[in-house]
Amino acid sequence: MKILFIFLIFSANLFPKLTLEEIDLMRSYSDLDAKSIIQNGTSFCNDYFKRNFSSTELNYQNSFTCKFSKRRNRFYVYMLAIDKKDSKSLKEFCSDILLSWPDIYEHVDRKFKFKKIDYLSGFYIENFFYDKVIDFSDKYEDDQRIISNELNNYILKNRDNFSNNNVENNLLIEKEIKKLKKIYKKILSGTKTDLDILIDQILRDVVRYKIFVNDIVNFKSYSCNWIPGKNMDPYVKREKYSEFENI
């Protein structure tokens, strides 16, 4: 696996347009059980906004959604169907919405370009233990409790895979213990794997933000667009969600 990712990083330097889809394919060759980076990252991102969205705190009934376009090699974090009824400019209207989401605002703001982005954590699958990102605290008792809880959850979710053969059962559990210990060591040491470095490079190029706006006064539809770390001032263009939906 290490040789594979050395090759991948070397390839990334030669071919800047290496895609997540290509990495997924290469990982599947080396590990049949490898999780898809694209599926994992997209699913986690959508779950993040579902968990953190509270309509009572905002003036609009919408949230961000995450979508990966293989055809465009873009990862979109977007909001749709916001009605604009006031006289504000579109750029000002969209910027006000963005300011209501500080985690996204900080990624768009060039000062925070390389800050860790929680909703993109799902792409770093080596920190994942099944359906969640493991976040250890460097407090031994607390961390051991996390490990114990995750193992119990694993056993519960995979109980159909266990049999009357205790030797095989123990091997399954030992495999998961090794996986958790590997994540534990990586997070506490603050190290980045070859795959992490490669994902960093790709996400900087492929992430885009969109807010779709229905201009009720002028009966037109627009989208406001941002590139992370570039400029808070959005690029506005005429665009309907239906034109974006099938990309």
Image (tube, helix red, strand yellow):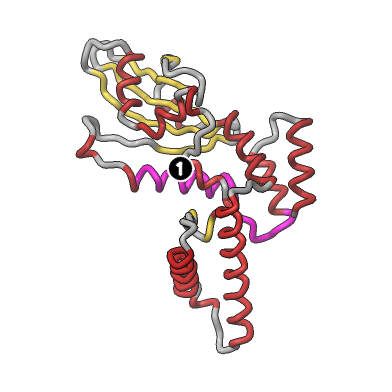
Q: Quadrant of residue 77?
A: top left
Residue located beneath label 1 in the image:
118
Residue 41 shown in magenta? yes
For image coordinates 30% across by 29% down, the residue present is: 100
Name the spot of residue 202 as percent of width and height, x first: 62, 34
**Residue 245 falls left or right of residue 3:** left
Above or below residue 98? Residue 40 is below
Name the spot of residue 60 as percent of width and height, x first: 24, 31
Main SS, magenta residues:
helix
Q: Is residue 157 shown to the viewer in this render? A: no
Q: Is residue 46 shown to the viewer in this render? A: yes
Name the spot of residue 63 as percent of width and height, x first: 33, 36
Three-letter code for the amino acid on which mark 1 is drawn: Asp
151 and 164: which is toward the camera: 151
For image coordinates 52% across by 28% down, the residue present is: 113
Name the spot of residue 196 as percent of width and height, x first: 63, 44
Characterize the local packing of mark 1: few (<14), some (14-19) or many (20 or more) Cα atoms within 10 angstroms. few
For image coordinates 58% across by 81% down, the residue present is: 169
- Please provide the residue range marked out in magenta: 29-50
Q: Quadrant of residue 209?
A: top left
Above or below residue 180? Residue 99 is above
